[in-house]
Image (cartoon, rainbow, N blue to C red):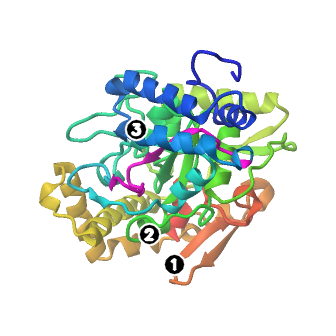
Amino acid sequence: MENLATTWVGATAKQISRAVRRGDTTATQVVADHLEQIAISDPALAAFRVVRAGEAIAEAEKVDDQEDLANLPLAGVPVAVKENTPVAGLPTWHGSAAARSAVAEEDHEVVRRLRGAGAVVVGVTRMPELGLWGTTDGDQEVTRNPWALERTPGGSSGGSAAAVAAGLVPIAHGNDGLGSVRIPAACCGLVGLKPGRGVIPCDLGLDGWLGLTENGILATTVADATLGFSVMAGRAPAKLVQPERLRVGVSLRAPVAGIRPDEPNREAVAKASKALVGLGHDTITADPPYSTAVGLAGLATWFACAYREADAAGLDTRTLQPRTRRHIALGRFVWRRAVHDIARAQGPERIAPEWWRQPSSTRLRDYYRVEDAAGRRYWIYREGVAGDGRGGPPNWFIHGLLG
């Protein structure tokens, strides 16, 4: 790809940054190629809320002029930022004009880190109103899946996922409370990473959905996801190495009662398991026995967080979409009547005590409970992302949610 003479669209972030650092191309040329592709493809996709064409070219030229170009891990890489994250000079949209906040005076810390690594922000990507939904559609635009325009890219980081899957950017920023990176990654065939608690600066909204929300990355390769994650986490990019033989738990059990995976999803899990075995790893069935309290807690948190965020932002709910207004009204009921606290009290040790007490050879990971300065309790891994000791439980952070 480094020797392409026509366009850099479709190149990975690692390929682009390597070529820019070596002088095989310029950040300006790379960004221009991607802006041209955005102009061609995005009218059909609606991945972007705002495209910073002129500003991006000017910033790419500054990257080319930097004396430390050879030390920039994302030199010249076009990136997109989810629209609920402040980018200097732009409003922070939160999924709709009614939820939009004022023009940001400075970048969010993760945006600052991306720019500092040589990346160029070409635009901000769409999300559903207040990030509440697993699809990315609004009152004016519906974001489409590049693989099949009649399908959704998922949500709430659907705009970022669509942009990466279409090759409009090689990597994109997203954030995730109840699946908002992982759902779009699954819908669009991408690598999506929601890291453990506190690994990447969050600072979104009132309290990041009671601490559930984390900033993450969407990419087409594990190498690019690693690179983007490392930059946003403020770490030196790690070298990818082959893992030792792993024991991987496989489950088709949904945490919500009554939900069953369809045949295509079962086939996909079977193929993934077969691929892992083919690579020399072991797969075993590991089905935690979820109770109905899991679904109750998930719904209660979803509703309550919507109300709390809208109330803290001082939004006029009359201007929001009807479905959002209904959701916030239910959240007000849930929060004020302590339904949320009652649901959270049904902790993992009460939901499935036998499973949690099994030896780690069976349940695969050791968990332990911690309490933060605010008195909030969480179940977390003993081994977190990149071995830093902090990480989120599987199954959509359901156990931290229930803590």
3D distance between C-alphas at marks 3 and 1: 45 Å
Is residue 320 in view? yes
Q: Residue at x 48, y 53 (%)?
A: 176
Q: Quadrant location of residue 335? A: bottom left
- Residue 57 in the magenta stretch? The answer is no
The amino acid marked with disc number 3 is Gly
Q: Which mark is residue 120?
A: none
Question: Considering only vertical position in the picture, is 139 above or below 394?
Answer: above
Looking at the image, is 172 positioned above or below residue 275? below
* Direction from residue 288 to residue 344 in the image, left or right: left
Residue 294 at x, y percent in the picture: 47, 60
Assess disc 2: are there few (<14), some (14-19) or many (≥20) residues with their C-alpha within 10 Å of its C-alpha. some
As shown in the figure, which amino acid type bears the numbered disc 1? Arg
The residue located at (45%, 29%) in the rendering is 35
- Residue marked by disc 2: 210
Which residue in the protein does label 3 denote? 54
Extreme residue in the right direction = 244
Quick one: label 3, few (<14), some, or many (20+) residues within 10 Å?
few
Of residues 341 and 198, the one nearer the viewer is: 198
Other-residue count near label 1 (Cα within 10 Å), few / some / many at <14 / 14–19 / ≥20: few
Residue situated in front as seen by the camera: 180 or 319: 319
Are discs 2 and 3 less than 8 Å apart at CB?
A: no
In this figure, which residue is indicated by the disc labeled 1?
376
Disc on the earlier residue, 2 or 1: 2
Residue range (magenta): 71-91
Asked if the residues shown at circle 2 and circle 1 are in contact, with their CB atoms under 8 angstroms apart, the answer is yes
Is 72 positioned to the left or the right of 183 in the image?
Answer: right
Residue 199 horizontal/vertical position (percent): 63, 63
Main SS of residues in magenta: loop
**Badge 3 element:** helix
Say if 140 sits above or below 384 in the image. above
